[in-house]
Image (tube, helix red, strand yellow):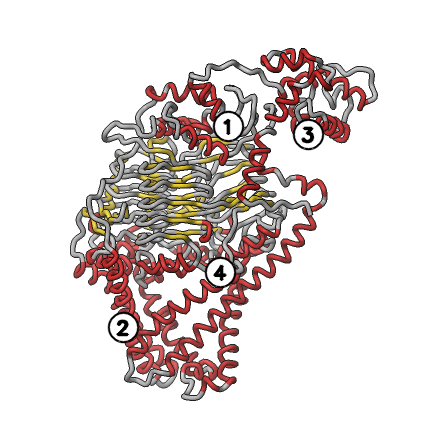
Amino acid sequence: MGFVKCDASEARRKRALIGSVTRGHFSISSRGAHAVKNLTKDSPAGPTASSAIGNGQLDSRVDIGEAFAENLAGILGVERVAEDANFFDDLGADSMVMARFCAWARKRHDLPSISMKEIYRHPTVRDLARALVPPVVPLLEDDLEGKLVQVLAEVVHVDGVTADSHFFDDLGADSMVMARFCARVRKRPDLPTVSMTDIYQHSTVRLLAAALSDEEAAPAFGVAPPSVSTAAPASKAEYILCGALQLLVFLGYTYLVGVVGDLGYNWISAATGAGEIYLRSVLFGGAVFVGVCTLPIVAKWILIGRWKPREIRVWSLTYLRFWIVKTLIRSNPLLLVIGGRSRSSTASPLLNLYLRALGAKIGRGVVIFSRNLPVCTDLLTIGAGTVVRKDSFISCYRAHNGVIQAGAVTLGKNVFVGEMTVVDIDVSMGDGSQLGHSSSLHPGQAVPAGERWHGSPAHPTEVDYHTVARTDGGSLRGALYGFTQLLIALAVYVPLAVGGLILLLVEVPQLNALLNPGSAAFSVWTHYIDALIAGSVLFFGFVIFGLLVVGSVPRLLNLAIKPDKVYPLYGFHYGIHKAIARMTNVRFFTWLFGDSNLVVHYLRWVGYDLSAVVQTGSNFGMDVRHESPYLVTVGSGTVVADGLSIINAEFSNTSFRLSRATIGSNSYLGNNIPYPAQSTVGDNCLLATKVMVPVAGEIRKNTGLLGSPSFEIPRSVQRDGMYDDMVTDGRLPRRLVAKRRHNVVTMALYLLVRWIYTLGLALLGAGILEFYDGRNEVVIGVFGAVTLLFTIGYWVLVERIVTHFRNLQPRFCSIYDSVFWRHERFWKVPSVTYIQVLNGTPFKNLVWRLLGVRIGRRVFDDGALITERTLVTIGDHCTLNASSKIQCHSQEDGTFKSDHIAIGAGCTLGVGAFVHYGTSIGDGAVLATDSFLMKGEEVPQNSMWGGNPAQEIRDVQSGSAPGSGALARAGSGGRRALHRE
């Protein structure tokens, strides 16, 4: 059908082929160079051209130009074509005529190939000839430029590479190819280290060599490396013992919950009438709620006491206490009441009280939206009036090389911490300072009072991220808001959850039969019919009723909100806004409709302004979030990957304001991007994964942005346009129809497997309760463990069935290829959210192995996410921090790419680190906090990399520069990007 499926070797072959064909200019490939040297055989240019091309002289262009002019004259039917005549304006040619001209050139093996893009860029014979044969500048093989040219030619498989050849425009390279170039240069002891940041900022060998030569003059910029732990690694016996004790703790907790739940059910179900059931539900539910909320506080003070800076060896008995406290703190049901599991988290004074009770020093009027709560709370100090936005990490601990390192974090008064930021240990921010979105602070960094910093690692900026004015009366409103939340929880949520469930179980015959099946019920087929009916009504009732609610109720509530108006925090309008955000950010529905043709209709249903949609079949991924859907505009032809968080609400510690966020047309947005309403990104832009979206300066158009802080890169490379011909040859509409059919089946499977899972849980619960006779209370404790085992086994089986019990293979293909559609099904149908319950336990490694990850011994995983499990290899004793992500794919415009990732033994991935496809990390290497390791990178053994994009880190404490000044140049480059803003 004309669609391409590529394995890894085919992808390499295509990249090699593309290396000989360039965007905008031509370099002569090895075949082309050989052919040009033999112009004497077939070309009118004669022997002069051969010698001229070999010497890089202008005569070669003149002779090739004569050949072009002669042939074009024949095609046009004219006697002569002047070399300065414009093909279209002067000669009257059209695209059809010039396509025939290009076809003629491709058939001539003594001439370089020509594309229509070259015709439009160089619309005269003279300009075209000059572009095809650029001047060759003689280089000495022993100087820096010559060595870099030699390495570059080997990587891009192109002869005739010069010091002035543009990596992307002239050589047709992409980030994967240039990452390999960087890796080869790093392996040469006679060459300085080169990073991808250097490549993008100095896009020819001559500019790159000059920058590398001047690196000693670059201002020093870096971060302190992690302290080296002298603790011995845990033994196999400690590993097994820790896992066994963690399992016992889990069983004990579920047993306690079951016993208490049984007592409550018996007492409440004995009541007569709805009024008495409600009253008993309030009393019992309130008591249980208070008890469960205070349990983490009691456990922390008993098991830990007061936190101090220290190191804890993982899998030790001290670590077991750490794990218990961490799990209880982050699973407190109080977080559900205040919106802790919402994808648009709600700030609440109740959270401040909770953290204070755990030992944190929280000032008055602090507003915390993030639910990635600190664990070592005694080490956290936050001054009055500080705002911490959602999806930020301030944990006061991190894992490194097999140990938990606890350290202090101090935030002064009126500090602002942006979204998707990571604040590592041993850092501080002075009064009135700011840390921008998509930024990070590394150990040892201190932001002075009143300064604004951004980037990863952060450095000074002039950009103001805290732009909404404060209002008066915040303390009283906050107290009333917190009291109202607690009152609603105790009087509404808890009784509804407890009493309402009991009423359903008692009054609905099918549910009552499931709860009290009788001794022979499981041998009667009507029992399963009752389970099928009850489960179906509950599950599909939620789907249908939920869709109706998210598209109607929030619209009515939104009538009370006006854009760009400052409202008091914790007031009536704040409650309305957060209700809208909760109801329109339901993960179930975005996962159901995402990566399909129907996602645009769903987003319009919840309130997005999508203009004139250009259907791609994958306009949005499965993870798209917002503050207000009614203030989101997305331009025509734009494609969005997963992890987009649209920030169209601004907050101070006493006020908030909603503003419209506009994403330009014909753009592509990668993974994990917070997109603020103040964005200065216009049309036709590529926003790379984990990019910091600029919020100041001129509007960016027709460009790409990468990094934090962001800098410009090519909007696209020729490889990403390999399938553009579908648009012109009429295949695209047919493929869209086929993709729609495939997506509908995928969505049906998504619903089917979750419906079966719901029925399975219902039957499992009823089956276990059959063996409970009021005395064998151990059965209740086992129920939680059996449910977890069923969940793991079920979803592992679902994933294996979706992949046909085969490993995924590296791909390079169009998004309109059925191979990609099957990969979308692999993303959507299985679920991996359950695996986060196992964070910090040996059992997570077992599940990763069941899912196909080649993972080594005693790996510590504190919350990593692996998207393509069977493409990943992880060595022994690695340390994976919370929110680190290993992603083996990327989708840019109409092209999908995936490849293996190999992580060596003893490696550490920092909090929020992101590893892209086609990368390898050597043994003992460290990827620092919030880093982005770009596709194709090779991290040497025992090195430390950091930043966005990642490069080797220099040690500012010792003054050494293992990366030969790479991060120093990144710092200065970041400042250059800052000035552009």
- Residue 131 or residue 580, whichever sits in front: 131
Crowding at mark 3 (Cα within 10 Å: few <14, some 14-19, many 20+): some
Query: In front of the other: label 2 or label 1?
Result: 1
In this view, the residue in front, 810 or 970, is 810
Q: Which of marks 1 and 3 is nearer the N terminus?
A: 3
Q: Distance between the residues labelled 3 and 2?
A: 72 Å
Residue type, label 2: Leu
**Residue kind at label 3, given as amino acid type:** Met
Q: Earlier in the sequence, mark 4 or mark 1?
A: 1
Residue 974 sits in quarter: top left
Query: What residue is pinned by disc 4?
Result: 799
Q: Which residue is drawn at 31% across and 58% down?
A: 842
Q: Residue 154 carries which label?
A: 1
The CA span between labels 2 and 1 is 66 Å
Q: Which of marks 2 and 4 is nearer the N terminus?
A: 2
Q: Which of 368 and 711 is in front in this view?
A: 711
Tell us which disc is closer to us: 1 or 3: 1
- Helix, strand or loop at disc 3? helix
Residue count near mark 1 (Cα–Cα under 10 Å), binned few <14, some 14–19, many ≥20: some
* In front: label 2 or label 4: 4
Q: How many labels does the image show?
A: 4
Pointer 4 local density, CA inside 10 Å: few below 14, some 14–19, many at least 20: many
Q: Which mark is residue 256?
A: 2
Label 2 crowding class (10 Å Cα cut-off): few <14, some 14-19, many 20+? Answer: some
Q: What secondary structure is marked by label 1?
A: helix
Give the residue pinned by disc 3.
116
